[in-house]
Amino acid sequence: MIDLVWLVPLIPLLGFVINGLGRNTLSKNLIGFIGSGVIFISFAISVGIFFALGADANKSHEIFLFDWINAGSLHIPLSFLVDPLSSIMLLIITGVGFLIHVYSIGYMHSDEGFGKFFSYLNLFIFFMLLLVLGSNYIVMFIGWEGVGLCSYLLIGFWFTNSSYASAAKKAFVMNRIGDLGFLLAVFLIFTTFGSVEFSKVFPQAANLMPGHSTVVLITLLLFIGACGKSAQIPLFTWLPDAMAGPTPVSALIHAATMVTAGIYMIARSNVLFDLAPVIQHLIAIIGLATAVLGALIAITQTDIKKVLAYSTVSQLGYMFLGLGVGAYDGAFFHVITHAFFKALLFLCAGSVIHAMHHEQDMRHMGGLRKKLPVTFITMLIGTIAIAGLPPFSGFFSKDEILAHAYQYNKVVWAIGVFTAFLTAFYMFRMLYLTFYGKYRGTHHAEEHIHESPSTMTLPLIVLAVLSVIGGALNIPESLGGNQWLAHWLTPVIAHHAEGPDHATEYMLMAVSVVGVLISIGIAYNKYNKQGHVPVADEAKRSAFANLSYHKFYIDELYDLIIRRPLDAFSTFFYKIVDRKIIDGIVNGLGWGTSETSKGLRLLQTGNVGFYIFMMVAGIISLLLYTYLSI
């Protein structure tokens, strides 16, 4: 079964080709069936691979397809690596991806670009599968660049809206910054180890001393690449703007695929990062700062998708915090649970937007729980899961990261717990503003509110179930579990960070749960009991609320210190260097030639006697030159 892994990415690629070529001729029902069906087939094969790997004593298989690049000492095969880490990623990408495809059938059914949309989704899944299956950094990089391309196509899917097109360009450009770091890291890896194959690089790296300068530089460059793809400070501002794409795109990018690529890459390269403690500290600091910043911005947003977008930024920060403190399995555990509840939350938001006729402002919602019962219940489950209440999945993965953060540094843990409290507050704020109180929209819109079709609600129900039970994958020993996921990942992640003793772990869980309940109580009192609705008038908001609402003016800061100077610099080069100097030289040569020829043509008189005179003068000049040079 494992030998069939090449079919997993190939089948979605076929779906892309069929739907891409037949987008204007095939019926929407057939396009939806093909687009979703190919992902389901890949999921079924992935399940078979997972169980075959579990029954196999050898937990790592490199499936060679063909030689791709042979140039001197550079040998790069196109081969896939099937191991515990990639097998889990296959299940997440194809499983959650399939549910998002099914949901898209209902959500995008009235869109003119239905066929094109599904072909893009299939291509996105293909490149993401290529990224996680590659047995070397080059194949991983091809998938890495491919998902960047597809994100550009999907975020700017409604490109006739100029702001949506700008959001797509922003995502593409900011990702290229990180991608440059990744590419430089790959060059340095080949220069240092003579290969880009994981199976050759990691054993050599394990023989180096911790803190080796080359490894530090490699891991720093890899981390820069991860910051771009997984939206960490300072390369995070593209992710909230990615909300310009259709809601299924938001769910796909923010939950199961693209933004997890950076975490996957660092977890895959854990051997290198363990040798660079200074970079691990940097990852922890950047991750924590991103988690706090994302949460502080989310608490005042009024666009339902923007709240979830900044929530994703914050949760990704949590994952990087886990990577930085050495809890690779804990960070990857949060990748899995986050895929369940964040995909659920985005699809629930899409269901609300669909019912509200594309209204995304929560100030115009309210009282929807009776009109959208399935959406409400499933979104409540997702909200509880991300808030971190037991026994929902988010509780186990979030608390595992916080437990390791406590061992790492008490201040880091305290800030992480504070961020968890903010998460519970802004998520229940969103829930209360959307589903409780009185409806605040127009009477005409209220009459047309209805629950979404079954193609949209069934994926919500499945994801809700996964959000409840997903934490069972890695229940800690202190709660009677056996940490299955940590044991499963041991062949890939040999170093497991030490957690606290059981008594300390119980205390940390208690602090977290009590704090979350208090945060929920505050949100309930303000947005449900008191019926508070965020005001549009900035003068009525506090200074901090205005800062948070305007995202701490980080985009404006980037505009001031980066874009404007670059624009001024390019204007100077255009007007002075390009037009006056370069064009001046080129045009001056042309002008000089033209003017010189105007004078020289006067010598062409047509008088034969003058020509004989000039010939004699030339001969005499040559004789004089010869005589004088002797």
Image (spheres, grey):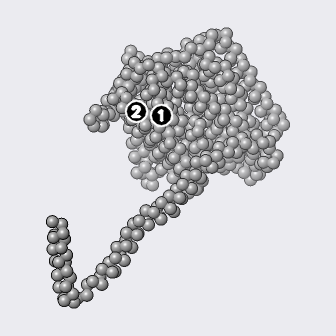
Residue appearing at x 74%, y 36% in the figure: 429
The answer to whether one can see residue 78 in this image is: yes
Quarter of the figure with residue 334: top right
The picture places residue 33, in percent across and down from the top left corner, at: 47, 42
- Quadrant holding the C terminus: bottom left
Name above or below for residue 291 compared with residue 554: above
The picture places residue 521, in percent across and down from the top left corner, at: 78, 28
Kind of residue sitting beneath label 1:
Leu
- Quadrant holding the N terminus: top left
* First in sequence: mark 2 vs mark 1: 2
Q: CA distance from mark 2 to mark 1?
A: 9 Å
- Label 1 near label 2: C-beta < 8 Å? yes
Residue appearing at x 54%, y 21% in the figure: 326
Residue appearing at x 64%, y 46% in the figure: 557
Which residue position holds label 1?
Answer: 221
Name above or below for residue 232 compared with residue 557: above
- Marking on residue 188: 2
Quarter of the figure with residue 386: top right
